[in-house]
Amino acid sequence: MSLLRSHPGLLIWVILVFAIGIICLIVGAIMAKSGASLRPIYWFAGFALLVGLPQFFGHLGIALSDARRENPKREALATLDAGGDRDALQAAARNLFGPDADPDLAADARTLFSEAISGATRARFASLPGGESVLVAEFPGFYDAQRAWVQYLRITGLNQAGGKGHTGVGYAVLRPTGDRAYIAQVNNLLVVCTGPDDGAIRRRMAAAGFTIPRRAPLGPDPTGSVPASGSSAFGMIGMAGGVALFLVYLLVVVGYFFKGASWSASADPKPGTPRLPEAEVRARIEALARTNTPFRIDRGTRDNELLVTWNFADARWLDLARARGLKRTLRTRLVFDVGSGVARTTDYTTDLEWSAGRGGADLRWKAEVGLVLFQREYSKVLGIQFAPDGSITPNLSYSYSFNPRELKDPLTAIVTQSGWIWRPVVWEGPRWLRWLTE
């Protein structure tokens, strides 16, 4: 729990992983109850893990690394508070403030800065031989230390002294006494270091074992004994390796997204089903428009393309939509690939707008393209209802549901029973890129 309290990034990802698991269980139960395939849930869970687990383990690694560096500081504060053996006190003071620290000069800072660091569980202040001073205060959690950082600047008046910085990199300021001060938050620790100049502060922070952020508002150390902010042994080779690793990871994520999304909604014909000619499959689909169902079949811009939509151009179905309050629907685009026997499909989400004028219904298509893996809508409306002829009905309420499977299941059945593969795609990429997109 201490890692979570001192590292909010890790806490956020723990909550996200837990929440994603709960959402997958709930949605999966709903889909299973409705008879839908659970492939979309498996794909979504895998994609969430692929994206989230590196973030989680990254934050966990940072938290564990910080704990290895900062736990000795917390133990040193506890040792100085408890008192006892001289050698133990000497080692604790050196660990906390540097090799030249004297435990007799490390006072309890809660009595010296009671108002500025109120809420600290432990705190020590030491004056050092080189003219520097260091204050280290421990707080219960990350946000407690963050509030203390702001409070310290406000109580001491340093926030009005024209300094530079923020909580992420620390705050450096020239004090009225003529020396410099650097106030930094290190997870759940507050560190205040003063010295004659920025170089002295850098040397003292390094001697005490504290890492100064790369963009800290401190000048370089003129003696060169402490590397300037931003210098690193990472080098160009390490940077190139990091970029290459990121590109490989990005390729894996993109490939999983496209191929997994396509797999999650694909349907194959039963083994041994003969493949019918494209023209016959198209004729079977077009026959839906002649049934008592709200389908409209249109030819696309290409010979092998069909567009299947709810038939809102028909006044009968428009009245039904108006009566049921339906405002959203689907259009499915099918492209037949004769060479591979695949019918690639893409879904378009729509909003319906209608008017009572001569122009009739206005169907506006939104710019939302992709796969609708699962969707169920339920709504109940209360109030006086009107029949299509304008008369008042005795019903004071009505409810409606919207399920895209009612549109897509007949299409999927026709395609697969004709020996073709039903393959939804987020993006119909060029032939040479289909190894990645489907």
Image (cartoon, helix red, strand yellow):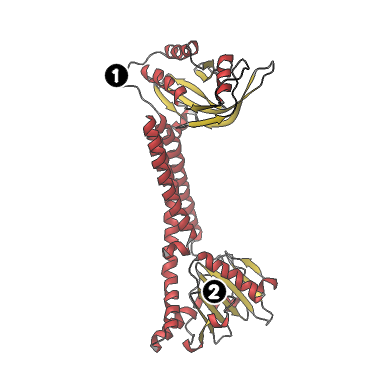
Residue 83: x and y, percent?
42, 85
- Marking on residue 272: 1
Which amino acid is tagged 1?
Answer: Gly
**Is residue 436 or residue 171 the one in the foreground?**
171
Q: Which residue is mark 2?
A: 191
Q: Nearer the viewer, residue 194 or 45?
A: 45
Quarter of the figure with residue 185: bottom right
Q: Earlier in the sequence, mark 1 or mark 2?
A: 2
Report x, y in % for residue 225. 54, 76
Q: Position of residue 300 (x, y in %)?
A: 54, 18
Does dot 2 land on a helix, a strand or a loop?
A: strand
Whether residue 36 can be seen here? no
Is 387 on the left-hand or right-hand side of 372?
right
Residue 256 is at least partly visible in this image:
yes
Asked if residue 264 lies left or right of residue 378, the reply is: left
* Residue 158 quadrant: bottom right
Compared with residue 144, is residue 415 higher up or lower down, i.e. above or below? above
Pointer 1 with pointer 2, Cβ within 8 A? no
Mark 1, Cα crowd under 10 Å, few <14 / some 14-19 / many 20+, is few
Give the class, few, some or many, for how many residues have Cα within 10 Å of label 2's Cα (few <14, many ≥20).
many
